[in-house]
Amino acid sequence: MNRWTRAAWVFFGFGVIAILCVRLEVISPSRSPDGIGLVRLVLAPGYLDTMDALSTLLVALFAGLTYWVGNLQRQTLEATLDVTREVERSYVVISHRPPGLSIGQHPRIVGDSPPPEWLRDISLTVSIRNIGRTPAQVTATCLQFLITDQPLPPDPPYDLSRTSSAEIFLGAGQKTQIFMNISLQDRSVDDILHGRLSLYAIGYVDYLDKFGTSHRHGYARNFYRTASVNNLRFVTQVGYNYDRRLH
């Protein structure tokens, strides 16, 4: 609101008061002591009651304005605190370093009874790192390999039996590592290497930020058999890589 608008409202207010409390009185020459006609402003009958009513109205308006300003300030403060929490809170993520998955080159025999079972190991080391500005408390992890010949379902098929409770404190920039390993039959590994089966590394980490809010970071990567530097690709399907508030 600019100054001209404010001035207009002030004049409007005075005009309303003048209309309610003041009236014009015309005095004819016959009634005037000096024989001259007059027009004068006089207070309207009951003007004191009108002033009381206006005073009450102004007090009510002022109280309402005070409440509105206070509520606006509260909302602004809450929004500012929310932004501060988002900027200053911890962000815990799962990542890996190239080359990614390690697949055993030579199968090993397991068991004594014929026919022998040929197995090969697939392993991956992931890092759980706090990339935020404040400390975090890791409360649970779930990491697994997923082997399928079907497209991924809409929701990650987490194997909750692999969930591990944890009490890991991570300061800003700190990390911890988790080693993942699975032994597969040699023919299954051959199917993965030739594209007949898809291999994924999926999971999540639950953590508590400095402000007492629980979050979950989701991780999902797809094995890319022809990659030369990093054989794990980011899964772009919605719902597999995320950072969401739990409660």
Image: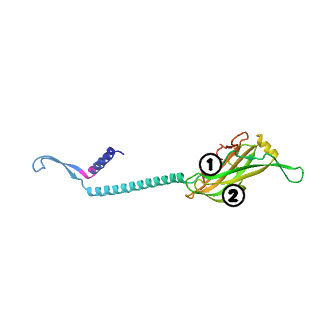
- Residue 226 sits inside the magenta stretch: no
Badge 2: few (under 14), some or many (20 or more) residues near its Cα, within 10 Å?
few
Most extreme residue toward the left is: 34
Q: Which mark is residue 47?
A: none
Looking at the image, residue 2 lies above or below residue 209: above
Q: Secondary structure at mark 1?
A: strand
Where does the image place residue 193, in percent across and percent down from the top left? Answer: 77, 41
Quadrant in the rendering for residue 66: bottom left
Q: Secondary structure at mark 2?
A: strand
Where does the image place residue 234, in percent across and percent down from the top left? Answer: 66, 43
Magenta region, residue range: 18-22
* Number of marks in the rendered image: 2
Say what amino acid the circle numbered 1 marks.
Answer: Tyr
Q: Is residue 3 left or right of residue 236?
A: left
In the rendered image, is residue 180 in sight?
A: yes
Badge 1: few (under 14), some or many (20 or more) residues near its Cα, within 10 Å?
some
Q: Are marks 2 and 1 in contact (CB under 8 Å)?
A: no
Quadrant in the rendering for residue 208: bottom right
Where does the image place residue 226, in percent across and percent down from the top left? Answer: 73, 39
- Residue 20 sits inside the magenta stretch: yes
Residue annotated with mark 2: 164
Q: Which image quarter is the C terminus in?
A: bottom right
Mostly what secondary structure, the magenta segment? helix
Q: Which image quarter is the N terminus in?
A: top left
Say what amino acid the circle numbered 2 marks.
Answer: Ser
In the rendered image, is residue 196 in sight?
A: no
Q: Which mark is residue 242?
A: 1
- Of residues 51 and 68, which is closer to you in this image? 68
Q: Determine the residue positioned at 23% across, 50% down.
A: 23
Separation of disc 2 and disc 1 at Cα?
20 Å
- Of residues 66 and 198, which is closer to you in this image? 198
